[in-house]
Structure formats: C-alpha cells, structure tokens
Image (tube, helix red, strand yellow):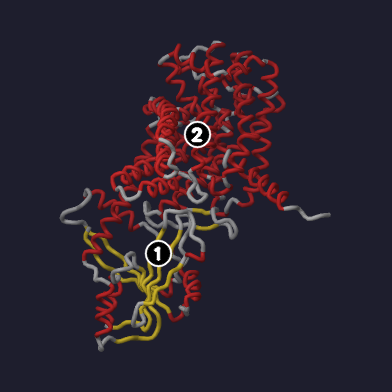
Amino acid sequence: MAADTPDKTDMKRLAGLSLAALGVVYGDIGTSPLYTLKECFNPAHGAPLTPENIYGIASLVFWAIIIVVTLKYVLFVMRADNRGEGGILALLALAMRATGTDKRRTGLLASLGLAGAALFFGDGMITPAISVLSAVEGLEVGTPMFQPFVVPITLAVLVVLFAIQSHGTEIVGRLFGPVMTVWFITIATLGLIEVIGHPSILAAINPAYGAVFLVNHGWIGFVVLGSVVLAVTGGEALYADMGHFGKLPIQLSWFVLVLPALTLSYFGQAALILDQPEAVSNPFYLLAPDWALYPLVALSTLATVIASQAVISGVFSLSRQAVQLGYSPRLDIRHTSDEEEGQIYIPRANWGLLLGIIALVVGFKSSSNLAAAYGIAVTGTMATTTLLALVVARTMWKWPLGLCIGLGVIFLAIDFAFLGANLLKVAHGGWFPLAVGAIMFLLMATWRRGRVILAKRLAEGAMPLDLFLKQVKDSENTLRVRGTAIFMTGDPDTVPIALLHNMKHNKALHQRVVFMTVVTEDIPRIPARDRVVVEGLAEGFYRITVRYGFFQEPDIPKVLRLCKAFGLEFDMMDTSFFLGRETVVPSVHPEMAEWRERLYVVMGRNAVSATDFFRIPAGRVVELGIQVQM
C-alpha cells in the first residue's frame, strides 16, 4: 500500500482536529437547544403562544446565531489571532500592542479587557450549573417522580466532574469529539423529522418575522431577547479555544455540522410547538419518541458534562494568562499531560468554581430559575470582544474607517441589545455573575496596580548596576567565595536588593554572580531558541534575560541548561538562588486606597512561592526578607 501523500496526511489531520473541536469548542453552544426555546416562551415574559410569535422567536434565534456566531466570531473575530492564540486576554494584548504607547488608550483597553475576563469567570460558574441541570431535568418529562432527585443528581455529576480534574482530561477528552458528533447528529435528526412534518416553519428564515415580532411587542420583545441570547452563549469559546485547534478546523466544524444541527433543532422545536402548544414546557425532550427519552437524557447529560469541561478548561487557561500577564498572584499550576501544554489543573480555580456552582444549583434549583441569571456575563464579554476586535481591525489591519464603523454599528447594536435585555434580570439572579465579575475585576486591577507601585518603590532606593560593578572592580577587599549565585530580579539595570542584603550580612560575593530577569511577553509562546539571552558583564558577573509567552510557565532549571549554548554551564549542587521576599507595609501617603493596599497584601501572602512557581530546587534557595512601604 502506498504511503499517504502530504495532501492526504493534511486532510486526515484537519479531520482529526475538526472532530476534536466538536468536543471542546462547541460543547457549550451545542447544548443550548436544551433550554433556549423553552425560556423564550416562558410565561413570565408575557408573549402569547401564537403562530406569529412562534415564527418570530424562531427567526430571532436563527439570525442571532447567523450574525453573532457566524459573521462576528467565525468570520471576523477569529481573524484577530495573537500568534495563533485567541481569548479575551490574548485579544487585549493584541489590541494594546496595536495602539502603541498611548497610555490613555492602553489604560482604557486594559480596563475593557479586564472587565471581559472578569465576567468570563461568572459565566464559568453558571454554564456548568444550567447545562447539567437542564439535562437532568429531562427525567421529569418521563415521570414527575424524579423531580426531588434532579438537584441531588446534578450535584453528584458536577462533584465527580470537578474531582477528576486533577487527573487530567486526556482520556475523557478522546471521547469528547465522537460523543458530540453523535449529539449533533441526534438533535439534527430529531429536528429534521419535525421540520419534514411541518415544513412551513422554514419560513422563519426570513428575518422579517423576527423584526415584526420586536416591533409589534415592544417591551415584551425586548424582554424576550434576554432568552434569545441563550442560543449564542457558547460563541466566545470559538475564539478562546482557537489556539488549541486552529482557525480552519473550528470553522469547518461549524459550517459542516454544528450550524445545520442547531438550525434543525431550533426549527424542529418551533414546529412541534406550532403543532402541540403544550410541548412548550420542554420542547427539546418532547421531540423524542417515548422510547428514546431516557437514552436522550443520558446523552444530554454526557454532552453537558463535556460543555462544562470546556468552560472549566477555559477558566484554567484564563487564570494562567492572568498570572503570566501580571494580573494575578502566582498560582499553583499543574500540568496533567506530558504532551499537551494546554492541559493544566489549577486547584484554587477548580475548587472555587465548584463552590460557586454548588451554591447556584442549591440556590436556584432549576434551569429556568438559572436562566434568569444567565446571559449578563457572556453578553458583557461579547461586547468587550467586539470593541477590542474593532480596535485591532482599524489600527493593526488598517481597515477603512467606514467599514469598521459599519461593523461596529451592526455588532454592537446587537451586543448592547442583548446586554440591555439581560440587565433586566439583575433582580432575579443576574446580580450573581455581576458580583463575581466585579470581585474578579477588583482583584486583578488591585494586583496589577499594586505591582506597579511596588516596582516604583523598589526602584527609588535601587543602585544602578553599572555603578555597583565599578565599585566591585575598584575594591580590593571584596571577599569572593566559591560557587555560583543567581539573583532573581525584575529590573535588569539595577542591583537586586537581595544581593545588597547578602553583602551587608555575609560580607562576601560568589565567584560567579548571575542576575536573572524573567520577562513575559504579550505573545502566546516564545520558542526555545529565542528563550535566553546571556550577557557577560565583568568581574565574574553575568546577566541572563529569559523570555516566555503568556501561555507558558517558567522552568528555571531548563533555562540553565539552555545557557550551555552560550558557554555558561551550571552545576546545580554548586549553585544558590537568592530570592527577595518583600513584606509590604501600608504607606503614609498611599497611591491607592488603604483597603486596597491591605487587599494587595493579603493576595501576596496567598501567592505560590517563587521557588515553586519558577520550579527552582528548594534545597538551593536562600530567601532574604525586606520591608517595602507602599
């Protein structure tokens, strides 16, 4: 048998990535048919169950998917890749790079990006809760006797899901693509059967039905938009997970399977409600014949677990990016795969998410109640993504101003309409994701601001490195002892305070002294060949600059091995790492509120140690404590 040609190999790889993307990227939006139409026709909205309204709402759902997901995310936003990576913080880094040195504009963009990232954490709590709850509620369709067990079963599924995170998702991940393929084929088939029986529902493709519904119902139509947005709540995942699979596999999966399946499912449910108005109580499960109900519940539960896993992985990735970009203290980040860099586990993020999700499930008790809280976080993130992408289109891609304004008017009008409709939910549970988002924004902004102030304070009393080297050269009394000392420093042009303290107390310098600075760039990854720069200074002093992307974690022992190419070799048993541990004390004239200073101090105390974060052998570390007044 002849070997595969390069074209065949590429096609196989594309097919494999497209299949994997089905499982990870489309889990969230793919399970939206479980609850979207049911919530659109919620009696609390006041929209009568008439044929005109059914056509109108079906049309709104369809065109929301076309404009928000297809046009905005799949065809526009995914063009804004940061060296192949996507996501709100990757987009923020790209937009800030595009705006250059304008501090006012970069400050505004940073605030927008942080707000979007903060809201994503709130979305990360609600998505698993509403998805798994809506799937398990299918048991009630079979018989009301299952009603008391819905919440306990949901909690059990979620606890198991979060408990396995520390073991990694590689084994389960192999099932994600095939399971979601079965899911999309199933919901497409169930919808198609109903559409064939009532083909007139396809008239809802005409956007006029949706426009007429909004015009005729005014305020009620605006309220219904808060439920229509549930159909596109997984759109942000398309962009966030672009780095895992690439743009083409995600786009291919969308156009070949996901978009047709979602369209058939929604139109099939609408056709069923036209024929049997009582089916509005749960049109998704009532599409299935009686014999298929429980298998469909099982498949739905598995699909929602996959959707939840995708959001959890997204929160882990966002948390890592926040650490690397300086918006979060150091966290314990564990790799769960030797082959896939993106498979990580962050204990604090994992258990914090679970506690929030348990509170949501116990507090709201049903997917309908949770739907009242859902949408605010994700629509806020969507609006932020649109603004940042437009900045990139204008400043980096040099698109015409008229085109950017036109796209902005269309996309932002829809984003803000959805956001405004969801703000009506604040009193009914929408406060929860807003509260989570506000807390996360405060924490990230406080940490970023605190690090800037602390760096300025340390620089005020720092000695220039050139002056220090001259003094060492001119002095004949400086005792030099055997071995290598590595001083970690954030400023490569000044002397680390840890070195000055060491000389003050020990009255000696090592034969070889290395100043090491670790820099995180605003691009996802730095290849190993560009990772390290070694400079020989004088008198046995060296300066090493280490560069990482915001998708990478530092590994100092590995860096030292890379230095061999520059003629600098290290014996770990003869090398000591000197780290400064700053104890921050409140300032007499604070640059930020005293309560924020105290919050910064608490966050710093709970950060993972530099030894663990940089993977430095603990037995080779010397920590020197200093007090710094903010």
Judge from the rendering whether residue 325 lies leftward or rightward of residue 148; answer left or right.
left
- Kindly identify the residue that appears in the image at 53 percent across and 19 percent down: 207
Query: Which residue in the protein does label 1 denote?
Result: 518
The secondary structure type at the circle numbered 1 is: strand
Residue 415 at least partly seen: no
Residue 5 at least partly seen: yes
- Kindly identify the residue that appears in the image at 35 percent across and 45 percent down: 110
Please name the amino acid that badge 2 sits on: Lys
Residue 329 position in % (x across, y down): 37, 55
- Give the answer, above or below, for where 620 lies relative to 6: below
- Kindly identify the residue that appears in the image at 35 percent across and 78 percent down: 541
Residue 620 position in % (x across, y down): 42, 75
Residue 248, located in which quarter of the rendered image? top right
Query: Which residue in the protein does label 2 denote?
Result: 72
Quarter of the C terminus within the rendering = bottom left
Residue 470 position in % (x across, y down): 26, 80
Please name the amino acid that badge 1 sits on: Val
- Give the answer, above or below, for where 523 lies relative to 369: below
